[in-house]
Image: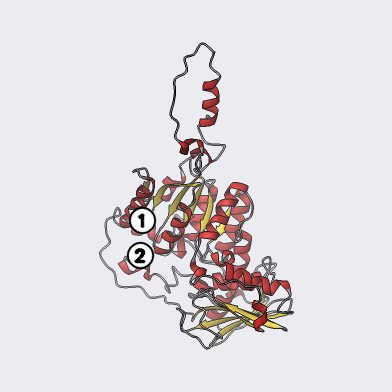
Amino acid sequence: MKASRSNPLTRRAFLRGSLAVGASAIAIPTFIPARALGRDGMVAPSEQIVLGAIGIGSRGRHVLECMMGEKDVRFVGICDVQRTRRESVKAMADKKYGNQDCAMYRDFHDLLARSDLDAVLIATGDHWHALGSIIAARAGKDVYSEKPCGLTMGQCQALDDTIQRYGRVFQAGTQRRSVANFQFAHYLARSGRLGKIHTLHASCYRPKVSYDWLPAEPEPPAEECDWDRWLGPSPWRPFNRTYVNGGWRGHYDFDSGAAILDWAAHTVDLCQWANDADETGPVSFEPSKEKITARYANGVTLIIDFLDTPFGNRDPHYRTSNGTCPVRYIGDEGWVETGDTGQIVTYPETLKSGMRQFAATAGTNAAAHTRNFLDCVRSRGLPACNSKVMRHSHLASHAAAISWMRGKTLQYDPLREEFVGDPEANAMRDRAMREPWHI
């Protein structure tokens, strides 16, 4: 897709040059596949977005399948520190394309060194999202990163700064902004149909944090599972298979904000959107046993509810069972609530007039969000959840988590992006990285 690739002679230019040969040349019929010319609904290879992926587990596989389902995408390489995951993704790609061309890498630098690569999907564990995205942007690649996009406030700031500096397209995997029922709830909030918005509810897991190590197990060969690369910038600890199988969640060295950001990266982001606050954040955070209460300078209150039944069961914090990641927006003339089931509940009921039905579990579907990213790779426009949007919603979520870990009300300056009068809280905005990794 890039004009700057090493071979400037495109198929189109070659064909034009061939037709320009002198009249004495003998015309020989040549079969050119429709795929090469971009006919019959196909996209010519020279016009395709060349995609690679780093760290693909179950969620990453869904996002990758969404991207590979687009006709203008050609997936060429998978990087993962686990051999079984590399081979699984390669098998999926080779089956789709009917060849053996998908390359496998253990070191993402080798993938990023490809001159034909336009963009990468990063779906590693949380502790690699920011640094992986930053290195990819510096290598000239556009980036779709799963959330949370940074393990700390400092990482989120550095990521946005890098995207701006290198002029890359970035999409955070907070896909609910691209899902219809959440878009309708946003419409009700911003159109004035709820009246003046005064309270927003964002759900998250009940916070937890562990500083313990799991028991040491024999470390496998690097070709099977490269433990050193899996750890990356995180502090060293002995290998345990549970970590690489997804059991890193809740461990402070690998997790974002006491597990709060696992959902808040979505739900706080949606509330920021509903409050027209994509360029700012709350000015105070007050933790309690059941919630964190944040307040914006415009007087709107954000309540981050701790949910005990997060997988679709009815929870007393919300009016109905909305599945994962429910949000509620309340104005002085009505309210709306929705979640991943696609169900929308409103008061008064007339707010739903003209509303169409939404598909179940739609909130987890990344198809529209990945299409938005791919369109922006082509146009160089700003995706729905670009790095600036990510920066402010993630900083708000991290600040809420720090208030909970500090166990006290914190004042926050969203312009300076620092806490007011609390050096200990400010020290928690970032963490050191294990050598040789650094931003």
* Count of marks placed on residues: 2
**Is 124 placed above or below 393 here?**
above
Separation of disc 1 and disc 2 at Cα? Answer: 10 Å
State the mark number for residue 81. Answer: 1
Q: Do the residues bearing badges 1 and 2 touch, measured as CB atoms within 8 Å?
A: yes
Q: Looking at the picture, tell me which residue is in the foreground, 46 or 431.
A: 46
Which amino acid is tagged 1? Val
Where does the image place residue 172, in percent across and percent down from the top left?
Answer: 55, 61
Q: Looking at the picture, tell me which residue is in the foreground, 330 or 300.
A: 330
Q: Is residue 439 visible?
A: no
Where does the image place residue 49, in percent across and percent down from the top left?
Answer: 51, 45
Q: Looking at the picture, tell me which residue is in the foreground, 180 or 74.
A: 180
Tell which residue pokes out farthest to the left in this image: 218
Which structural element holds mark 2? helix
Which structural element holds mark 1? loop
Q: Residue at x 58, y 51 (%)?
A: 375
Q: Which residue is mark 2?
A: 244
